[in-house]
Structures are given as C-alpha cells and as structure tokens.
Amino acid sequence: MKSVVGLGLLGSALASSHQIDKLPQKPLFADACPSNSILHNGVCQPSSFASDTGGEQITYSGNGSLTLDDARASAQKVADFPWTFWPECYSNENTTEPVCVFSNQEFAGGRGIFIVTTGSLAYKMLNKAAFTDPTSLSRINHHDNPSFVEHEFPGKGRGLIANKTLNRGDQIFASTPLVISHPGSYDLVEAERLRLAHRGVDSLPSASKAKFWKLLDHFKGDPVDDRINTNAFDIEIDGVSQFAVLPEIAMLNHDCRPNAAYFWDEETLSHYVHATQTIHPGEEITITYINNERRRHKRMENLKRNWGFDCTCSSCAAHPSFTAESDDRIDQMVELLKDLDDWTAGSRASPEMVETLISMYEQERLYASMGVAYKHAAEVYSSFGDRYNAIRYARLAAELSFLDKGFRDRDVREMQKMASNPEMTWSWKKRVGHKRASCGHHH
Ligand SMILES: C[S@@+](CC[C@H](N)C(=O)[O-])C[C@H]1O[C@@H](n2cnc3c(N)ncnc32)[C@H](O)[C@@H]1O
C-alpha cells in the first residue's frame, strides 16, 4: 500500500542495481572536461557511466569543491546539458555508482527540481513526459486561487480547510516535487548525504526554496534533512522506490478516515490530490499517511513510530467502546476480504458477503478506500454472471480507484473494461455453480 514515507523507509537504504546509461557529451576543450567528468573515447562523460568496451566501469571521486556559480558555469559550457548546475557527486565502497545531486531550475515552468540519485536513474527520469513534453504539465502546479485556506490546528500544526464545497473527484491540487531522492543516498556517509541535500535546496529557484523552508521540521535535526523526513512521500519511478517532497500536499494532515486521496503519476512526475467525498467549506481536508484497514493500536503505533505524533483523529480518539466496535469491524472486513479473494473451487465468496463488506467500509467511514470494496463487488457479481451488478460496481470501483491509484493504474483499467463488457473479463462466471453463502449456511 502506498503511504507517506516515514523515517523507517528513509533509514533503510536500498542498493541500486540498475544498468548505467551512456550519455556522451562534447568535450569543452580539446583534451579537458569539466572538473568532475572524465574524458573517455574523446567525449566528456557525466558523473557516472559504463564504457561501451566490455562494461568497464569508470569511477570518480567526490567533487564538493565547486561553488554553485562554478557549477552553473560548467553546465552552461556543455551544449544541451540537461541540468542547471554541474552535478556534485559522492561515492564509496557501498555505492555501485556515485550518488549525485541533479538540479534543473527550468523544470515545470521554472518551479525547479533537485534529484539526489545515481546518474543512470537521473537520466532515465529525463525520458519522462514531465521533461520531454512540457504540455503534459498543463494541469499541474496551478496554485493560484486555491479551494482551501491554511489554518492552525491545536496539536497538529498547520493544515488546510476547504473554502468552497468540494465534490467527489474534484482536483484539490496536482504538483511536481521540489525534491526526489533515492534511498541509495543513505549509502553515503552522513556528511556527504547531507551536503547533497543542502546543495539541492540551495540550487532551487528562490520561490521554491522559500516553499521548502516553510515546511514543518518535526524532528528538529538537520534543518534540510528534517524537512525532507517530515514531509516526504513514497513514490515509484520505473519500479524504483524513491521519495519526493511536494510542499502543497505536505500541508495536509493525516486522518484515519480522510476525505481526500492522492496518487503519484510517474509520467508527469506529479502528485495529484482529489476529494473522495463532499467536503464542505470550513472542513479540514485530510489524507491518510498509512494503511487504515488496521486496528486502532496498529495505526497509532505506525504513526508514532514513523511520524512521531500521537494520532488524535476521531477514529483514534473516540471512546474506547466505540474504538473497540471499530476494531471488530476491521477484523471482520479483513476476514471477508480473505474469503472474497479465495478463487478456489471451495470458495465461500458470495454477493451477500461483498454487500456486507461494502456496508462495513461505509460504517467505518473509509470512503477514500471504497474502491477496494467496489472492485471486490464487481468481481464477485461478475463471477456469478450477474452482468448489471458487475457493471454497477465496476463503474464505482473505477471512479474511486482512479482517485486513489491514478488513471494509468491496472486495476482502474480492468474495472473500466468490466464496466463496458463484463463477459470479457477473467472473473466472468468463474463461480457459477458455487453455492451462495448466506443466512449462515456455508457449503
Ligand atoms: C506533512 S506534515 C503536515 C503539515 C503540518 N501540520 C505543518 O504544520 O506543516 C506532517 C506533520 O504534521 C503533524 N500531523 C499531521 N497529521 C496529524 C494528526 N492527525 N495529529 C497530530 N499531528 C499531525 C505531525 O507533526 C506530522 O509530522
């Protein structure tokens, strides 16, 4: 399940196993290259690359000596260089490739971005529509005239409240990150990792730099690192887990029963937030930082461990008799989901079961996660050959999952397919002939 990144993830560095892309550049002088690159076969190679002669790996040491101005001048001397500053890099025996900070001040119409990662992963990102086709960002980063205002909540800090009615599906914002960072940066020694992060912040355009510094620093450690730890979101690019800082969405507080959902779109390198139910003016807009289909103490433990705060949302703070009731419902939901996911001949899954599951989600006010329940419903009805109920729930699942998983998600596409033609989906009539478990009689 996707979630906002907690310290747990940031603390666990992943080793990169990616092939290194080749990016030949023209030498600046006949036999010289910018300070941190290497002349190889007549071309200056960027910070990291594998030569085309049998995988020979060229390594080079850190280059923390360039000032930002020098790094800008070096970058400008190379035709079509994709970064505003010559990247600063570090490596050691734990890194398979140097880890560098890549900054582009022109990105997303001048919002800018810095990326702490390996050369191979950074250059892969350059192939995304966000870099290759600026029109792909036409609906992104429109932060004028917002549908919310900032508000101070006792015990939670700042948050956002709606200033107009938001309906399910309304886009609240969609933004590109100011920071993308690969967990491999944790393979560097602490001082070098922090140096890259500070360098990255210094390299942002001034408006974005101000947004970065406005972020909450919950843990009161290194000021840049802390802002990243407090506000980073877990994202994936080409199957590689990374984390991203987006100052707008970072203003949203957690609620175990949120009224908004978000998803990451890796083509546009953008994060979208939509309302998942009607939000009235004056109501706080919330998202979830965790998986909520868990008992209260597990949710609270997770938030405390990874985020360092005591959850005070209503489903955490309610009277113990209410929270006990909620926990029982959650247990039952987990059991129902297990049965509904059973596609063997002995499966007890039935339409009655899935209607109960939907009711439990509603009773729990888990509206932002209803896509899961509706998808199960669509599949159960399809498996019993009930065309119109399959269509009804597939439509609901597609709409809700879209808000939670994004328009390119496989589940969304599968539900769209079922909504137009249930007979063509894998689950169609899979359970015809099974007894329908209801009224306490299971086969
Ligand atoms: C991503 S920031 C959210 C915006 C933050 N409140 C601010 O003032 O910038 C995450 C931090 O907000 C606070 N927070 C978010 N949701 C909360 C909640 N439900 N209860 C208490 N604190 C919360 C915690 O300090 C957490 O580390």
Image (cartoon, rainbow, N blue to C red):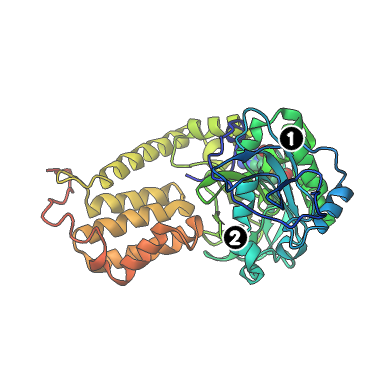
329 relative position to 214: left or right? left
Tag 2 secondary structure: loop
Amino acid type assigned to the residue bearing label 1 in the image: Ser
In the rendered image of this protein, does residue 89 appear above or below residue 285? Answer: above
In the rendered image of this protein, does residue 141 appear above or below residue 315? Answer: below
142 relative position to 202: left or right? left
Q: Is mark 2 within 8 Å of ligand 1?
A: no
Q: Residue 283: which quarter of the image? A: bottom right
Label 1: how many Cα within 10 Å (few below 14, some 14–19, many 20+): few
Q: Which quarter of the rendered picture does the C terminus lie within?
A: top left
Which circle marks residue 61 in the picture? Answer: 1
Name the residue rendered at 51%, 35% in the picture.
299
Name the residue rendered at 26%, 63% in the picture.
425
Name the residue rendered at 72%, 58% in the picture.
82
46 relative position to 374: left or right? right
In the rendered image of this protein, does residue 89 appear above or below residue 34? Answer: above
Q: Residue 141: which quarter of the image? A: bottom right
Which circle marks residue 127 in the picture? Answer: 2
